[in-house]
Structure formats: C-alpha cells, structure tokens
Image (tube, helix red, strand yellow):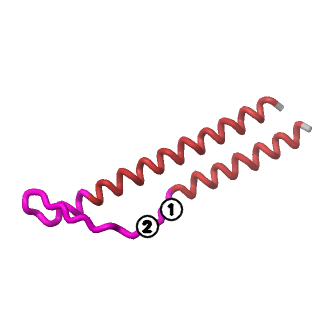
Amino acid sequence: MHEECVKTACRALLQAAKWVGELHTTTRRPQRKEMRVLYSEPETSRFLAAVKRLKRLQQKRERQTRAAKQRIRQTLRKLRAC
C-alpha cells in the first residue's frame, strides 16, 4: 500500500516538474498594431506594446509557477498521509 502511494506521488511530482519545465516555451500570438505616438516618436508605440507583452508573459509565468507549486504541495501532503 505504501509503495503504491510513493509511486503515485513520484509520478505526480515528475509530471509537475515536467510541466514547470515547459513553462519557458512560449507561443506567439498575432500582434495588434497600436498607433500611439508620444512625444512625436513613432518607436514609442512599439516600445509600449513590447513592455505590455513582457508584463503579460511575466504574470503568466508567475501564475503557472504558483499553480505548479500548489500541485506539488498537494501531492506531498498526500504522500505524508500514506
């Protein structure tokens, strides 16, 4: 019985670790062109769009990492209960 719990927990941890490793692969969405111009500089709109995209990606990674950590903690709790 205990061996089955350990095997199940190990499988779940490996799957979660694999999932965390896949977080770094990103998919690109088609970009919307925004035509905001600040201080008469045409590059500003592209810079602002890039900053927005980077912030969104960072928030997504943080969200996914939190979820993966929660799954790992849950699996460890189940393992301790066995």
Residue shown at 53% from the left, 48% from the top: 64
Provide residue 53's location: percent of width, then percent of height.
35, 57
Say if 49 sits above or below 31 in the image: above
3 left or right of 51 in image = right
Measured in 3D between alpha carbons, the distance from the residue under mark 1 to the one under mark 2, in whole angstroms, is: 10 Å
Q: Main secondary structure of the magenta part?
A: loop
Q: Residue lying farthest left?
A: 40
Say if 27 sits above or below 9 in the image: below
Q: Residue lying farthest right?
A: 1
Label of residue 25 in the image: 1
Residue shown at 20% from the left, 62% from the top: 45
Residue at the disc numbered 2:
28
Image quarter where the C terminus lies is: top right
Residue shown at 63% from the left, 50% from the top: 17
Image quarter where the N terminus lies is: top right
Disc 1 secondary structure class: loop
Q: Is residue 31 magenta?
A: yes
Front-most of residues 32 and 17: 32
Q: How many neighbours does mark 2 have within 10 angstroms: few (below 14), some (14-19), or many (20 or more)? A: few
Residue shown at 53% from the left, 55% from the top: 23
Disc 2 secondary structure class: loop
- Mark 1 belongs to which amino acid? Thr
Say if 15 sits above or below 5 in the image: below
Q: Is residue 80 magenta?
A: no
Provide residue 73's location: percent of width, then percent of height.
65, 36
Q: Residue lying farthest bottom?
A: 30
**Span colored in magenta:** 24-48
